[in-house]
Image (cartoon, rainbow, N blue to C red):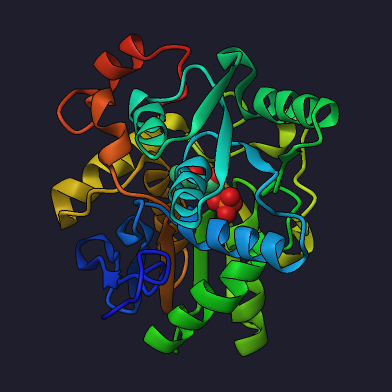
């Protein structure tokens, strides 16, 4: 497909069947590969929509610097888009995210403010709010509360899936801000109210990059739990193993939250007889290469990254 710029090339990602994971003939599993977006994650969609909304309502002009709390993907997308459009960008990020993330942000010219790693993304959110309260030249788009986040999925991700698989019965995605599940979910339910929307969430004590457990105390304002038909709890170990299996069995090189989504989808696949399940894989594996997850054992890896939020 031809695009007039990299920003226009966002979206229209492949929907690929994963036949080796199908447990019975009537149950088919498909993956929407969001790692195929220009900066390698689903967040390109929402970053484009949030920046456009800020330009449209006049809140973004040359005097402002965009500042966003992010564990990486949204920051990288915002860094690419702001660099193209000529705006400044600062990311507030836990200091223990994988090094690929900070490298890529710096490559796009973004500034990074580090928040304490042990406080996770909630620590970044609190710090970003403090900074913006003190300095009004910063503009926080705040993906957790910005209607353009689910709006981007309602306008693009949902319609792409309906076009590519009109017979979809279930949609499984990770829950971070909730934007993917809310926006895609709304588009799918409007198309066919019987389609079930399933959130993959980490077990309360497990960290899976990009996903959040609502038990940690912060519920994103854009999240409407009534949109979800189920929440499927996945451990760090299942995510890790799922991510490694995806590459081994299907050649799909995806990030760690995709292993969590796959685990949730397989659980669902085991208890239905007929289904067309779409999994959304939020990013590619590149940003997790330094974990060694594709070449090392789980136990070995667990020890070396203890306390970090690499998966
Ligand atoms: C790797 C990864 N997976 C999944 C998600 C969850 O997506 P959403 O924020 O739309 O709920 C995110 C976003 O934070 C992410 O970075």
Question: What residue is at 28 percent from the left and 24 percent from the top?
Answer: 291
Position of residue 294 relative to residue 36, above or below, is above
Q: Is residue 145 left or right of residue 309?
A: right
- Towards the viewer: 177 or 251: 177
Question: What residue is at 52 percent from the left and 76 percent from the top?
Answer: 156
Residue 179, quarter of picture? bottom right
Marks counted in the figure total 0
Q: Is residue 17 left or right of residue 255?
A: left
Position of residue 140 relative to residue 181, above or below, is above
Residue 18, quarter of picture? bottom left
Question: What residue is at 52 percent from the left and 46 percent from the top?
Answer: 74
Give how far across and how far down residue 258 sits, in percent: 39, 49
Residue 134 in sight here: yes
Question: What residue is at 71 percent from the left and 29 percent from the top?
Answer: 128
Please identify the quadrant where the C terminus is shown: top left
Q: Is residue 258 left or right of residue 86?
A: left
Give how far across and how far down residue 215 sits, in percent: 73, 33
Give how far across and how far down residue 257 sits, in percent: 43, 43
- Towards the viewer: 152 or 238: 152
The residue furthest front is 62
Residue 56, quarter of picture? bottom right
- Towards the viewer: 32 or 243: 32
Give how far across and how far down residue 32 sits, in percent: 37, 66
Residue 201 in sight here: no
Please identify the quadrant where the N terminus is shown: bottom left
């Amino acid at each position: 497909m031809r695009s007039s710029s990299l920003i226009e090339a966002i979206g229209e990602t492949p929907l690929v069947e994963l036949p080796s994971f199908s447990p019975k003939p009537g149950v088919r599993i498909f993956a929407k590969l969001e790692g195929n977006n220009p900066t390698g994650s689903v967040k390109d969609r929402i970053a484009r929509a949030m920046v456009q909304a800020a330009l449209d309502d006049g809140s973004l002009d040359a005097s402002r610097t965009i500042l966003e709390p992010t564990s990486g993907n949204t920051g990288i997308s915002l860094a690419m888009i702001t660099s193209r459009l000529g705006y400044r960008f600062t990311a507030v990020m836990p200091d223990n995210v994988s090094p690929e993330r900070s490298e890529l942000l710096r490559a796009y010219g973004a500034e990074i403010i580090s928040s304490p790693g042990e406080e996770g993304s909630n620590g970044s959110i609190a710090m970003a709010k403090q900074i913006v309260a003190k300095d009004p030249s910063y503009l926080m788009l705040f993906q957790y509360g910005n209607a353009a986040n689910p709006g981007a999925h309602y306008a693009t991700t949902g319609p792409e899936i309906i076009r590519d698989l009109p017979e979809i019965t279930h949609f499984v995605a990770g829950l971070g801000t909730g934007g993917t599940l809310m926006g895609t979910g709304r588009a799918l339910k409007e198309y066919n109210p019987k389609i079930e929307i399933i959130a993959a969430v980490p077990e309360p004590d497990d960290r899976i990059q990009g996903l959040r457990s609502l038990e940690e105390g912060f519920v994103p304002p854009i999240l409407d739990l009534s949109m979800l038909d189920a929440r499927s709890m996945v451990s760090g170990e299942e995510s890790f193993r799922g991510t490694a299996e995806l590459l081994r069995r299907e050649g799909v090189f995806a990030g760690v939250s995709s292993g969590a989504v796959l685990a949730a989808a397989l659980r669902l696949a085991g208890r239905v007889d007929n289904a067309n399940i779409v999994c959304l894989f939020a990013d590619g594996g590149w940003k997790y290469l330094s974990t060694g997850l594709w070449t090392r054992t789980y136990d070995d890896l667990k020890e070396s990254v203890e306390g970090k939020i690499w998966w």
